[in-house]
Image: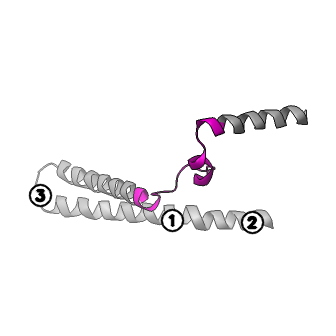
Amino acid sequence: MYFCLVAYVCDLCFIQPIQLGTSAGVTISTVVFNRVTSSLREGEDVIRGYRAAQWTCCAFAVFAALLSLLVFRGVGVPGHRKDQSSHLDGASAAQNEQSHDEKAVTEV
C-alpha cells in the first residue's frame, strides 16, 4: 500500500511534468520547422528548418537554466545551516572539532 502511494506521488511530481514538457517542446519545434520550410522555394534545402528548430530547442534550454537560477537563488548547500557556519571563526571551529574528537574518544 505504502509503495503504491510513493509510486503515485513520484509519478505525479516527476514523470507527468517531464512527459508534458517533452510533448510541448516537440510540438513547438515541429511548428517552427514547418513554418520555416513552408516559406522555402521548390527544391531548396530544408536545413534552414532544422536550424530554426534547433535554435528553438536551445532557447528552451537557456530559458530553463535562467528560470532555475532565479527559482533556486539563495538555497545554499543542502545540509548546511547559515547560523552555524556564519558565527564560527577559525579558533572556535578548531575548539568545536577538538571537543567533537574528545566526545568520540569517550564514547569508545
Q: Secondary structure at mark 1?
A: helix
* Residue 61 x %, y %: 36, 54
For residue 93, side relative to residue 63 (left or right): right
| Disc 1: CA contacts within 10 A as few (<14), some (14-19) or many (>=20) | few
Between 42 and 45, the one nearer to me in the picture: 45
Direction from residue 19 to residue 8 in the image, left or right: right
The residue pinned by badge 2 equals 4
Q: Residue at x 30, y 60 (%)?
A: 29
The residue beneath circle 3 is 40
Q: In this figure, which residue is indicated by the disc labeled 1?
A: 17
Q: Relative to 104, is 61 above or below?
A: below
Circle 3 or circle 2, nearest the eye: 2
Label 2 CA crowd tier, 10 Å (few <14, some 14–19, many 20+): few
> Which residue occupies 17% across, 51% down?
48
Say which quarter of the image contains residue 108.
Answer: top right
> Quick one: label 1 or label 3, which is nearer the N terminus?
1
The residue drawn where x is 50% and y is 63% is: 19
The residue carrying pointer 3 sits among few (fewer than 14), some (14 to 19) or many (20 or more) residues within 10 Å by Cα, namely: few
Coloring applied to the structure? one colour
Q: Which badge, 2 or 1, is on the more N-terminal residue?
A: 2
Type of the residue with mark 1: Pro
At label 2, which amino acid type do we have?
A: Cys
Magenta residues?
A: 68-93
Against 70, residue 87 (above or below) is above
